[in-house]
Amino acid sequence: MRVAMIGTGYVGLVSGACFSEFGVHVACVDKDAGKIERLKRGEIPIYEPGLDDLVARNVAAGRLSFTMDLNEAMQGVDAVFIAVGTPTRRGDGHADLSYVFGAAEEIAANLDRYTVVVTKSTVPVGTGREVEAIIRRVRPDFAPGADFDVASNPEFLREGSAIGDFMRPDRVVIGATSDRAGEVMRRLYRPLYLIETPIVVTSLETAELTKYAANTFLAAKITFINEIADLCEKVGADVHDVARGIGLDGRIGRKFLHPGPGYGGSCFPKDTLALVRTAQQMGSPLRIIETVVDINDKRKKQMAERIIAACGGVVDGKTIGVLGVTFKPNTDDMRDSPAIDIIAALQAAGAHVRAFDPAGMAEAAKLLPGVEWTEDAYAALDGASCMAILTEWNEFRALDLKRVKTLLKRPVMIDLRNIYNPGDMAKAGFSYSSIGRPA
Ligand code: UGA
């Protein structure tokens, strides 16, 4: 089989490389000449464990290629995937679909045999139909269903474990407008039949909404446990035991019940907001998700207040050592990372922030002026009045606590990811605070 993948961002590049590993011939297309050149040289523009090897292997096998020429990429394809960005539109919170619609027009101009046009980007309900209408407008010569069909195939990849998520997914969701399109999509995912992956074939609209429902549900789950964690602190309970106690109920499930500084990243903040707007527009507001968005926004400021309180209530003129700034570990992605608002609030309170992150500092430096970036974790803590862990990178789980204690002015640690144990930290002589656990 043969496919073209438009967009070599996170989703497009991972999906393209993984399809080629399935034995499909994949041409990845992007308008960014620099990016295509780098990919051709074997340089991977994003940080994703395992992606460089996967790309190199499939390029060498002749199954994966990169080009700026959509016409060339679409020669002989069974399907073309739209995997371009859908950022939040400025001003109203809706998803900006100009890149998706632009791609649809270009696809239309290059269609020359029956092709399934698949949206992989996260797009509001109704976008697939709009893509179809655009193609029909550009190509009025096509009889309905004769030369193309549209489909929706949302991705459920997590940054940092995207390849595993693609190769061993919990399910694949396909929204198809015809049996013919559904069949092409099923064939593309055939290797997953061996591992008995459920394939959920639905209407176009259902597939589009399923993606948003999944992400907003997960965002709500995180927000729920964050609020329970706050209550735990008031009543002297331990949120991890509560999470285990409820999560063992199969109806609830154990995953995504880890409390923290609020969800961030390129997906949950954008998708929760976009679904809230769609629901309002449709006259069927999602009040739960509206509240989730509000709680998560306010949480970041509350986290900064927590750090300031642990530092004695005043941070003006003090140095705070920060470990981790990316929205989660194993990524260099800073998009909507809680650290951005937390650090900005600390700086606004007069603190000098000295920080280290294993992968995110280059990007973070653009977003957080005034932060002093260091070469390693210990340098960030040297002479600081207190330290705060904002991202749970593995290397922060095994700090030499004796050394940390000698570096800090006072042994104060605020652990917003609960990677240390309160009992152990007390024994090590730290004034330690975390989320939702008795001190
Ligand atoms: C998320 C979804 O998990 C993917 O299924 C989806 O495909 C993706 O969005 C997308 O729409 O493209 P991702 O943003 O990579 O993936 O990251 P997650 O691992 O889901 O984490 C999101 C945020 O929630 C992070 O800030 C993380 O720290 C936070 N989180 C996650 C918690 O605070 N607690 C948890 O228990 C889990």
Image (cartoon, rainbow, N blue to C red):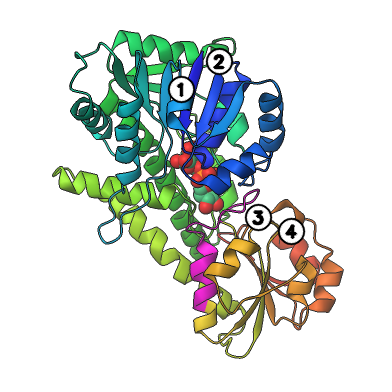
Residue at horizontal 72 percent and vertical 33 percent from the top: 53
Q: Which residue is mark 4?
A: 396
- Residue 295, position as x, y percentages in the image: 37, 60
Is 8 displayed left or right of 389 in the figure?
left
The image's mark for residue 392 is 3
Looking at numbered disc 3 in the image, what kind of residue is underneath it? Glu
- Which amino acid type is marked by label 1? Val
| x, y percent for residue 136 | 20, 25
Tell me, for residue 398, which label it has, or none: none
Q: Residue at x 13, y 44 (%)?
A: 283
Drawn side of residue 62 relative to residue 402, left or right: left
Residue 438 appears in view:
no
Provide the secondary structure element on which disc 4 rests.
helix
Q: Assess whether residue 11 is covered by the magenta stretch.
A: no
Q: Is residue 272 visible?
A: yes
x and y percentages locating residue 93 in the rendered image: 29, 55
For marks 4 and 1, the one nearer the N-term is 1
Q: Which mark sits nearer the N-terminus, 3 or 2?
A: 2
Earlier residue among tags 4 and 2:
2
Residue 192, disc: 2
